[in-house]
Amino acid sequence: MKSCLFLGALMALSVSASAAEMGGLKESTAQAVKVKSAEQMKRLPQKDSGTLKVIRKSIEKKTRTEGQNQAKAGVQRSNKLRDKSLEMSLNASNFSIYDAWINFDLDFDADGFYSEFTVGFDPDVSVGTASVYAEIFISQNGGDWEFLGDTEDFVITQDDTDEILVSFALNSGFPTDQYDILIDLYETGFSGVVATTDPLLDADLFALPLEDAGYDGNTVISYVSSLLSYDLDHDGFYTQVTLEYDIETVDTGRLVYSEIDLIDTHNNYRRTVATSDFRLGNQTEVVDLILESGYVDGYYDIEIRIMDAITNEELTYAAQVEFSSLRSLALESEEYDDYGTEVIVVHDGGGSLYYLVMSLFGLVLFRKKRN
């Protein structure tokens, strides 16, 4: 009798620990995470059996404790060309641009081409101080120099390091390509250029990989959580998972849908389901996945894609590599979650707890036989 009580307590403890471990909310709050396109990922074989129900809920955007990315003031292609007959100022000998550099700030689609960047330069004056300003030009793959932007007046001082930073967000008119940058420095109140630097003088301004926001996949999934629910037989495997994920975008109003893959980590089969169409915005999406049939108890990964409803183009992608809340979820379908039947589930490979339970069970039978 005591052996039976001990065995029952041990099994109850193991089930309780499993449920506590797997049933809680799992979160990841990484900001503006980008992963490889689904086309770049190895496509796994599709599961052609089983029933997986998907229910999308529309809710207002939640406020997270983590800060959200803020877009910079953007620029459009101006088509205003640099004057090819610019004259040098009579004071040009007093000025120079000691150094120039580029900081690459944002590449939404992680393709190596940036839609936001910063131009930095260090202008010098040889005597006293001077009030100056700069005009910045851009050239697409060796083409004409087009006006990109200018600075306010600022003061530079002899023998000082005057680092000037000018940030740009390319909104439109800049297709994916290599671009060059040129900087003209002017003395306030005087005509003529006092100093210039370009790719021939500074290689950091040559062949910059740039593209505007329209080419730079301007939608991301920035937050994902998963919540497991409904485990009637208390074996630690659940029949429903609720996904909650935040979408950040500058492409509001676009008609899209979510495509979700449920991947069996044991055999690498996946089942793809889709939500109803919805309008894209800065929003929180909630999706319930209900495993109705055909899924034995096991551990499943989830992948989420946001797709254009008209062209079926993939806009952004989130997977278990970057979001732990999409990894190794303990799931089974409803026909395996039988509340009225005592179920002992043995996974391939067993484990120390399994062998301990079986040994104790054999000991109980042996003692009962001897009595």
Image (cartoon, rainbow, N blue to C red):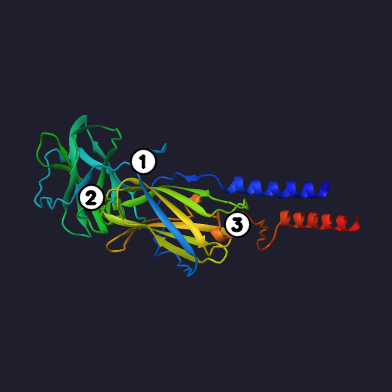
Q: Which residue is mark 1?
A: 68
User: If the image is split into quadrants, where does the C terminus sit?
Assistant: bottom right
Residue lying at 44% horizontally and 44% vertically, measured from the top left: 29
Marks 1, 2: nearer the viewer: 1
Q: Which residue is mark 3?
A: 338
Q: Is residue 103 above or below residue 109?
A: above
CA separation, marks 1 and 3?
A: 44 Å
Farthest residue toward the front? Answer: 340
Amino acid type assigned to the residue bearing label 3 in the image: Asp
Across and down, in percent, residue 236 comes to 61, 52
Element type at marker 3? Answer: loop
Choose the circle earlier in sequence order: 2 or 3: 2
Amino acid type assigned to the residue bearing label 1 in the image: Gln
Element type at marker 1? Answer: loop
Q: Which residue is mark 2?
A: 171
Q: Is residue 331 above or below residue 117?
A: below
Amino acid type assigned to the residue bearing label 2 in the image: Asn
Residue lying at 71% horizontally and 50% vertically, measured from the top left: 11
Marks 2, 3: nearer the viewer: 3
Element type at marker 2? Answer: strand
Across and down, in percent, residue 132 comes to 18, 35
Q: Nearer the viewer, residue 293 or 248?
A: 293
Choose the circle earlier in sequence order: 1 or 2: 1
